[in-house]
Amino acid sequence: MTVSLDDRLAALRTLRTAGEGRIPDSVATEADRVLERAAERRERSPGYTVVGVFGATGSGKSSIVNALVGADVARTHVRRPTTSAALAVIWDPDGAADLLDWLAVRERVVREAAIDPRATQLVLLDLPDFDSIESGNRAIAEALAAQVDALVWAVDPQKYADDVMHAQFITPHARHREVTLIVLNQIDLLPAADVPRVVASLREIVERDGISKATVMPVSARTGSGIDTLRTAIGELAAARRARDSRLAADIATLAGRMPAPGEPRRLDARAVRHLRDEVGVAAGVDIVSAAVAGSYRKRSRQVTGWPLLSWIARLRADPLTRLGLGAARQGDDPSVHRTSMPSLSSAARARASLAVRQFADAAAEGLDENWRSGIRATVDRSVATLPDSLDLAIARTQLPARGSWWWVIFAITQWAAIVAGLVGVGWLLAAALFPTIGLPPPEIPRVEGWAVPTLLIASAVLAGVLLGIIAAALGALTAAARRRRARRLLLASVEDVVQELVVAPVAAELDRVRDFSAARAVAAA
């Protein structure tokens, strides 16, 4: 898969954004620098290639620059330190001026004849020694090593295996193989038979540094041996005009390699979400409210459908929903203003909700790097703090099944009809007993199967009231149980909305952030 520089830069921006708080501060700062440097470098002299010649004291890098140019343009000395400032050799001063200003290279030499016909848009830099005893010289070399498009590492036969040079300077640029040339200078000091052996040894060391298939070029700046080959190699870098983008791509890949892989994020398990909802719902009092819905229904059912002579007793007991600040009496209230009267979550309830949330987060973060797991835990910790108020508001907003049933009216009418019938029977018997005492003829009392009709009316009224009460109580209990289940479903749905907003969605966003980071890291490090 071919990855363009634009793709890599976009990936690095994603890494910087998604990795906020998850990657080391030093890496984040370096990412900002790389993005800024890439933007500025692409704006300045885009057709130019900047080749920096780096080396330790005594490696002869200034002599190499002189040999490449064919003139004594760089100062050469025997005593340390050698070069104290960067020197630019250019062939088009106007075109390269802005670029050199950005590189902060003040010393410039203009030449007419290019070192290679293809290298007219070339900037060749002679850099201070990176092992100089002058800290300022080393700082200049390190800064420009991060800015040039291509690197030429000059080593000599005496110090080509120096551990400090390889560990501190060559290894950190291991991903820049495409824009790196390793030059073994001063081969004239070696017996001709030893040159291939030293070159092979240097190549092996450099490959251990991480620069696979390294190009090692033996040269002698003093005799000119190998200089033409080096000129051709630099000319090819300049002609291809890919060095700048290759260098920036390598910088991004190196930086991406310093960012630990976050791990493989899991998909959120629907069963885990339901378990979280149920646990938080129990802690929030869903069972208490749903039981109150059932209790409220049974109370009001007894008031309406019970035997009128006794049903008034049910009115003396408080409605369970009213005690909680819920029910039909509060349906028109604004829940955000008129909250429930439910008691605050107890320590046990808070602990239960907190434990459920953290277990959910830990399960979701399983397999991730510790920084990313900590980030998910911090996210849910903030959510736990806001859960109680949000849950209370969600319960207050839930439209509970608190209305009565249609059959209440039928039972109420029937009960009152039975009461009226019983009162008629009582009045009839009283009239038959009292009228003769005041000189009035008693009303006739018909009989059915030997039973007086008034007595039958009274007995039927009592029996109907008892039977209606039993049937209404049974229907009320069944309906109350159904209302309880329905209320629980509605309340759990409201709790789930809160859980989704405060816990599941933030955790899912963190997992998406991990996926974005992993995908961007793969692109940046490709």
Image (tube, rainbow, N blue to C red):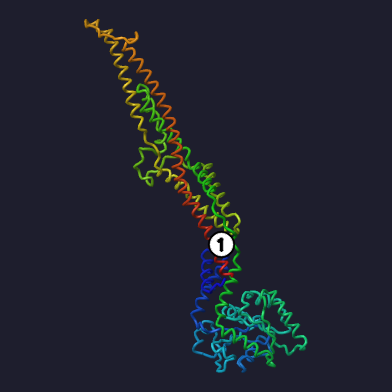
* Residue 209, placed above or below residue 80: above
Q: Which residue position is annotated with label 1?
A: 22
In the shown orientation, is residue 380 left or right of residue 68? Answer: left
Q: Position of residue 24 (x, y in %)?
A: 58, 65
Q: Secondary structure at mark 1?
A: loop
Image quadrant occupied by the C terminus: bottom right
In the shown orientation, is residue 180 left or right of residue 416? Answer: right
Q: Position of residue 320 (x, y in %)?
A: 42, 34
Q: Is residue 105 visible?
A: yes
* Residue 253, placed above or below residue 314: below
- Spot the residue most to the front: 449
Q: Quadrant of residue 84?
A: bottom right
- Spot the residue most to the left: 439
Q: Quadrant of residue 177?
A: bottom right
Q: Position of residue 66 (x, y in %)?
A: 63, 91
The number of discs equals 1
Q: Position of residue 524 (x, y in %)?
A: 56, 69
Residue found 29% across the figure and 16% down from its top: 424
Q: Is residue 325 visible?
A: no
Mark 1: amino acid:
Arg
In the shown orientation, is residue 197 left or right of residue 431? Answer: right
Q: Who is closer to the viewer here, 224 or 85?
A: 224
Residue found 50% across the figure and 79% down from its top: 42
Q: Who is closer to the viewer here, 205 or 393?
A: 205
* Residue 193, placed above or below residue 425: below
Q: Is the residue marked by circle 1 packed among few (<14), some (14-19), or many (20+) residues within 10 Å?
A: many
Residue found 24% across the figure and 5% down from its top: 436
Q: Who is closer to the viewer here, 134 or 514?
A: 514
Image quadrant occupied by the N terminus: bottom right
* Residue 425, placed above or below residue 372: above
Residue found 54% across the figure and 62% down from its top: 21
